[in-house]
Image (cartoon, rainbow, N blue to C red):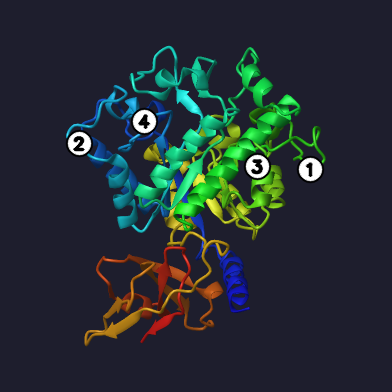
Amino acid sequence: MQKGLLIIFLLLHILLSKLHTQPVFEFRGVWVASVVNIDWPSAKSLTTQQQKDEFIKLLNMHQRNGMNTMIVQIRPAADALFSSPYEPWSEFLTGTQGLAPNPLYDPLEFMITETHRRGMEFHAWINPYRAVFSTQSSSVASTNITKTKPDWFVTYNHQKIFNPGLPEVRNYVTKIVEDIVARYNIDAIHMDDYFYPYPDKNNNEFNDKESFEMYGNGLKKEDWRRSNCDSIIKQLHNAIKSIKPYVKFGISPFGVWRNFSRDSLGSNTKAGISNYDDLYADILLWLKEGWIDYVTPQLYWERGHKLCDYDTLLNWWNKYTYNKHLYIGHGIYRAGTNAGWRNKNELPTQIKHLRQYSTTQGSIFFSSKSFENNPNGWNDSLKNNYYAYAAIPPPMPWIDSIMPIMPLVEKTTNNHFYVTIANNTNIKGFAVFSIDEQKEPYLENARIEKYIVLGDSNKIEPDKWFEQKRRIFVSSVSRGNNISEWVELK
């Protein structure tokens, strides 16, 4: 009974916090793509120190813009931007697949440490089935799995793709994820929209005939392919939770599940492809079964798009969250590409619209590089307006609904305060809240003035907020983003 009431309490607080123009709980993420050096590292020729400097610069930019989560692509193909016992170093890191950084370091360990140091979450983004990005130009090490297990792969559209229909392939991908979860202090495993490959321009068939004949079990081919994707998602969910139950599992699918013309549950869109029919990814099933913790549909279209309108899809996805988290994927990379994306109000309005839904908990932007030139002034819009105050990624009560212990506060003679914790197990930081003196001290009236990472300077100087006639409170924040009862500074 007590646990049930706490879950209701947390969900109510999340809902109430969304009534703000500055929510207390909101997911604010950025995709950092490593494939073909889209975002980081920006080139294959960077030295170890240049890689580190570039990532820190990238982090600092997003921290200034108000982000609280980095989604970094650490396995763009059957390779690794980390020290893997199973797969070679990525060519996008050193220029040659299998060649280690020199001087040697573990980029993933470094990125996690620097991200957490800034009070941000780190979601490890992997591509499950792409094995060779380009059969025409990719560097492929002799130890690459495509060389040692060639019968596991289908060559399609100048790429080598793991065959999702093979149980040994699903076991191999699961082994890779288990290793990452076990050895690294990540907050989530994240996968994007690449399951079965997108149809090529000539609409050639993905050649999995032999495996279908072996494992089809009387199913229609399209149903069998969907069952293969279902199987890997369930298998990965079970593996992640068996190792570290607090590690989240999220999927970022193509923005359209199915068109209404194909399914009465589908969206009122006219997309040329869909998750269900072309990529064989039944996202709604995964949400309904609880195999994933969050979904981030890639709604890269503008408002008013003739085939896939942003607002239509935003409304549709909010109907099918099955009580899991929904974060909207925004196509900031499209800035300036058409009339809609030349409109400086496009992205701000998208954010305002998603905040109207209690079932949407935030945003992820594709991709990091797009922010470097402050497109349409949107960096300024975020840091000065929409993300002007810090937000905590929303807690997931089905993973962790335990309220952490309250912080200890000591007042000094010069009206400064020091915040500590008696037991820092499962505590990652402290949130400093303020409310107008005329309002009740409820979360719906609060904003976060400062977030303190555990281990940083724990000094709080509230005079400037007192001068603004605001009351100041502090709470501890758990790894699961639950907050403790407040302690008022006075």
- What is the spatial separation of the Cα atoms under label 3 and label 4, in whole angstroms? 28 Å
The tag on residue 104 is 2
The earlier-in-sequence mark between 3 and 2 is: 2
User: Where the C terminus falls, by quadrant?
Assistant: bottom left
Task: Name the spot of residue 274 as percent of width and height, x first.
Answer: 68, 32
The earlier-in-sequence mark between 3 and 4 is: 4
* Residue carrying label 1: 265
* Residue carrying label 4: 87
- Label 2: state its secondary structure: loop
Task: Name the spot of residue 19 as percent of width and height, x first.
Answer: 60, 66
- Label 4: state its secondary structure: loop
What's the amino acid at mark 1? Leu
- What is the spatial separation of the Cα atoms under label 3 and label 2, in whole angstroms? 39 Å
* Residue depicted at 33% across the width and 35% down the height: 85
- Label 1: state its secondary structure: loop
What's the amino acid at mark 4? Glu
Q: Is residue 460 visible?
A: yes
* Residue carrying label 3: 283
- What is the spatial separation of the Cα atoms under label 1 and label 3, in whole angstroms? 13 Å
